[in-house]
Image: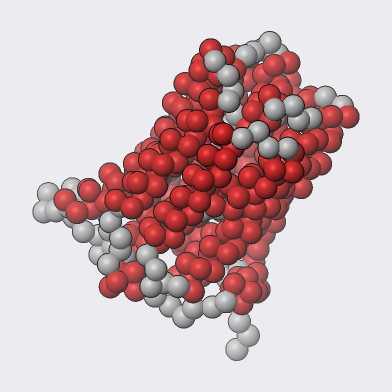
Amino acid sequence: MKRLSKSGSLSRADAVISMQYALIQALYWAANCSFYAYLTVFLQHRGYSPSQIGYATSVRIIATMVGQLVLAFIADRYRRIPLKYIVGGLMGTAVIASLFLQFTTPAYAGMLVLLFVLGFTEIGVSILIDMLGIQFMNAGSSLSFTACRSCGSVSYAFVAVIMGRVIDARSVEVTVHVHTVLLILTVAMVFIFRRCRAAEEEEATSGESSTMRGALVSLLRDHPQYRMLLIANAVLCFGYWPINSFMPVLMEEVGGNNTLLGIALFVGPFAEMPMLAFIFPRLKRNHSMPKLLVVSMVCHVLRWAFYIVVTTPFGVIFQQCFSMFSFALSYAAEVQYINENIPVENRVKGQSFYSIAGNLGGTFGYSVFGNVLQQTNIRVMNAAGTVFVAIALGLMVVMTRLPAVRKREA
């Protein structure tokens, strides 16, 4: 049961949990933005070609997939270990890798190793950071996950615009310094965050445990909608991740600079905040999650198709407004869909498999479209990516026509 005060507001304990969790999301996504939003610019500065950048990004995504598989297993297998300690330990490892990147200039092979470590730890742990909040919700807390997650979008937005100005004024190398500091602050906040008590953890994760392989087989066999959701997400990320990642190339082509790139990176996440904090909690009361996922896919197609014809820096900035109805809506809807339709004992794994499907698609996308960009130009690459986003829309429409749960024969 939700813990509310007599006036209907959050209890003192839930208010503290919500504020601490919102700060974790804010710091985590600020750290993420400070480095990864400008990773293409950073790698270009270090002298790598578009194809090398594509492969390097693929390595990081592969590491993220491996990390999410391993971490989902650890979180499920060793439930006696509080999530906050697993998250804190992994983020601490990311701090060490960031320090290496800060004080050394590794060869390409060394860069791949460091990006693998960062992908496994810092990016791979994102699913567990989400679960830090979701476990309190499942245990009856009044914490609003989407509102807290919106703080991450807002912090990402402000860091993006600030970093753009700083990079133009100084050097892209400053991204690594800021990244390290923000990672350290995130680790500190994670360890301050209150852990779920044993009784709450048992309630939040009750159910018969299953192996990763058994959970995947069960989810794919018994949940036709979820199966199609994974396929659609993989195709979506195959198409749009490279477009989004190579935004600096497009911004340069239309006459922009890092300051304008920072503004564009600000507008997207900032536009996500109203959806996550205010609009989606109302939408979910009156609309099904599959329907909202289809709407988000339509907005994805419109957003990335606009990239093909944009001719000015302000056009690039404007299209970022679509992030409210594309990424933010799809993110909130898929989290809610999994929470509503996947058995409680498999929810962490279900969320992990969804993320892994996207990462798998994105990995191949970076590898393929990095070469497309090197052989052609940014317009051709964006057009090809948008075609796959449109295919993902078709798959999502097919998903709505499938049953959520397969009927068992009597």
Res. 379 in view: yes
Using residue 369 as the reference point, say whether residue 396 is left or right of it: left
Spot the residue most to the bottom: 410
Q: How many marks?
A: 0
Q: Is residue 159 above or below residue 78?
A: above
Using residue 403 as the reference point, say whether residue 331 is left or right of it: left
Q: Is residue 217 above or below residue 8?
A: below
Spot the residue most to the right: 375
Res. 153 in view: no
Which image quarter holds the N terminus?
bottom left
Q: Position of residue 101 (x, y in %)?
A: 59, 37
Spot the residue most to the front: 104
Identify the residue at image location x=68%, y=24%: 45
Q: Quadrant of residue 237?
A: top right
Q: Nearer the viewer, residue 180 or 296?
A: 180
Q: Position of residue 85 (x, y in %)?
A: 39, 60
Q: Nearer the viewer, residue 193 or 252?
A: 193
Identify the residue at image location x=70%, y=43%: 110
Q: Position of residue 117 (x, y in %)?
A: 60, 50
Identify the residue at image location x=29%, y=71%: 198
Which image quarter holds the C terminus?
bottom right
Q: Quadrant of residue 155?
A: top left
Using residue 177 as the reference point, say whether residue 142 is left or right of it: left
Q: Position of residue 157 (x, y in %)?
A: 47, 28
Q: Is residue 270 above or below residue 335?
A: above
Q: Nearer the viewer, residue 249 or 34?
A: 34
Q: Quadrant of residue 367?
A: top right
Colour scheme of the rendered structure: secondary structure
Identify the residue at image location x=53%, y=39%: 99
